[in-house]
Image (cartoon, helix red, strand yellow):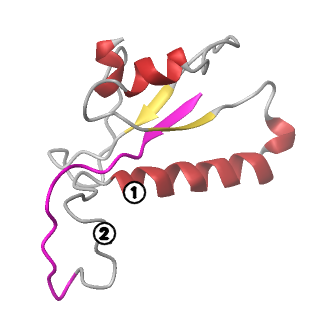
Amino acid sequence: MLRADMDALPILERTTSRNAEYISQTKNVMHACGHDGHVSILLCVAKILTTQFKDKINGQIKFVFQPGEENGFGARMLIEEGLLDEKVDQVYGLHLWNAAQPYIVQVGSGPATASRSV
């Protein structure tokens, strides 16, 4: 399973000359830590895996766009809705992180973000 969070945060986004074309149209929410980036990355990975690598994949892959990551209830909600009713061998999540150094990929294991509340 490949997972990316997609929820907007309850933060007022100010319009500037740099963001005027793509600022959120919903009042008082924004994708402050790159949730739009998470969705874009997972969509691209899904497209590549299901087109270019489809014949090389042995098994199934679930692509999960998870809401509720910031409030800590997203993983629990998806589990309660049956996301894991079928066996899942491994889960990989991604998250853009402002504190990370540019061009560095950090890898860790164990619970992270919303999965901590499960």
Is any part of residue 52 visible from this angle? Answer: no
Residue 56 image position (x, y, % from top left): 82, 37
Q: Name the residue under label 1.
A: 37
Is any part of residue 19 visible from this angle? Answer: yes
Above or below, comparing residue 91 to residue 28 in the picture: above
Position of the N terminus by quadrant: top right
* Residue in the foreground of this view, choosing between 104 and 24: 24
Q: Choose the circle earlier in sequence order: 1 or 2.
A: 2
Q: How far apart are marks 1 and 2 (CA)?
A: 14 Å
Q: Is residue 84 magenta?
A: no
Relative placement, left or right, of 101 versus 58 is left
Task: State the image quarter where residue 2 is shown.
Answer: top right
**Magenta stretch prevailing secondary structure:** loop
Mark 1, secondary structure of its residue: helix
Relative placement, left or right, of 48 versus 68 is right
Amino acid beneath label 1 = Gly
Amino acid beneath label 2 = Ser
What mark, if any, has residue 24 been given in the picture?
2
Q: Which residue is drawn at 29% across and 16% down?
A: 116
Above or below, comparing residue 34 to residue 4 in the picture: below
Magenta-drawn segment = 1-18
Residue 64 image position (x, y, % from top left): 56, 36
Q: Residues within 10 Å of mark 1 (few under 14, many from 20)?
A: some
Residue 26 image position (x, y, % from top left): 30, 65
* Residue in the foreground of this view, choosing between 43 and 107: 43
Residue 58 image position (x, y, % from top left): 81, 26
What mark, if any, has residue 117 been given in the picture?
none
Q: Residue at x 45, y 22 (%)?
A: 77
